[in-house]
Image: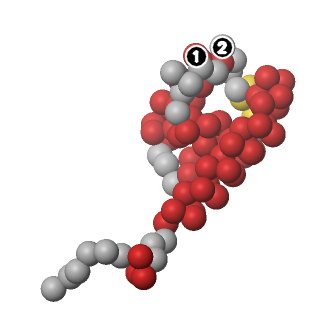
């Protein structure tokens, strides 16, 4: 996956799709509607040249390529979530502005 054609949101979507093994489950997990999730899924399928999830009997299963990427994608997403969680708060003692 080229960084020029991908972004962190695509990796978050890919992680949710692989872990949930369902587009519906991934949309619930990410609090998105199905049409909103369809865009990153289509981009992922095109970029990776892989369907990501395929129907198997009455459920969806990740493709071998998706499973191969699963641990790395999960690690990247967890690292990014940890970084942004640290950046959420701010220290009032370091605030240099004066409010009136």
In the current view of this chain or complex, which residue is farthest to the left?
Answer: 100
In the current view of this chain or complex, which residue is farthest to the bottom?
Answer: 100
Say which residue appears at 51% left-offset and 62% top-offset.
87
Q: Is residue 84 above or below residue 51?
A: below
Say which residue appears at 31% left-offset and 74% top-offset.
96
Q: Is residue 70 left or right of residue 12?
A: right
User: Does the CB distance between marks 2 and 1 fall below 8 Å?
Assistant: yes
Q: Which mark is residue 49?
A: 2
How packed is label 1: few (under 14 Cα within 10 Å), some, or many (20 or more)?
A: few
What colour scheme does the image use? Answer: secondary structure
Q: Is residue 33 left or right of residue 72?
A: left
User: Dividing the picture into quarters, in which one does residue 90 lie?
Assistant: bottom left
According to the image, label 1 marks what residue? Answer: 46
Say which residue appears at 49% left-offset and 66% top-offset.
88
Q: Position of residue 79 (x, y in %)?
A: 68, 50
Q: Secondary structure at mark 1?
A: helix
Q: Position of residue 13 (x, y in %)?
A: 60, 40
User: Dividing the picture into quarters, in which one does residue 72 lie?
Assistant: top right
Q: Secondary structure at mark 2?
A: loop
User: Dividing the picture into quarters, in which one does residue 8 lie?
Assistant: top right
Q: Nearer the viewer, residue 54 or 97?
A: 97
Q: How many marks?
A: 2
Split into 4 quadrants, where in the image is the C terminus?
bottom left
Q: Position of residue 52 (x, y in %)?
A: 70, 26
How packed is label 2: few (under 14 Cα within 10 Å), some, or many (20 or more)?
A: few
Q: Nearer the viewer, residue 73 or 43?
A: 73
Q: Nearer the viewer, residue 95 or 73?
A: 95
Taking the image as drawn, is residue 20 in sight?
yes
Q: Is residue 59 above or below residue 5?
A: below
Taking the image as drawn, is residue 55 in sight?
no
In the current view of this chain or complex, which residue is farthest to the top?
Answer: 49
Split into 4 quadrants, where in the image is the N terminus?
top right
């Amino acid at each position: 996956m080229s960084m020029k054609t991908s972004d962190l949101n695509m990796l978050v979507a890919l992680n949710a799709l692989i872990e949930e093994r369902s587009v519906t489950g991934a949309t619930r997990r990410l609090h998105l509607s199905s049409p909103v999730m369809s865009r990153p899924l289509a981009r992922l399928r095109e970029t990776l040249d892989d369907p990501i999830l395929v129907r198997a009997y009455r459920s969806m299963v990740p493709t071998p390529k998706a499973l191969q990427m699963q641990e790395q994608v999960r690690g990247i997403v967890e690292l990014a979530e940890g970084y942004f969680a640290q950046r959420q708060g701010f220290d009032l003692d370091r605030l240099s502005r004066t409010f009136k």
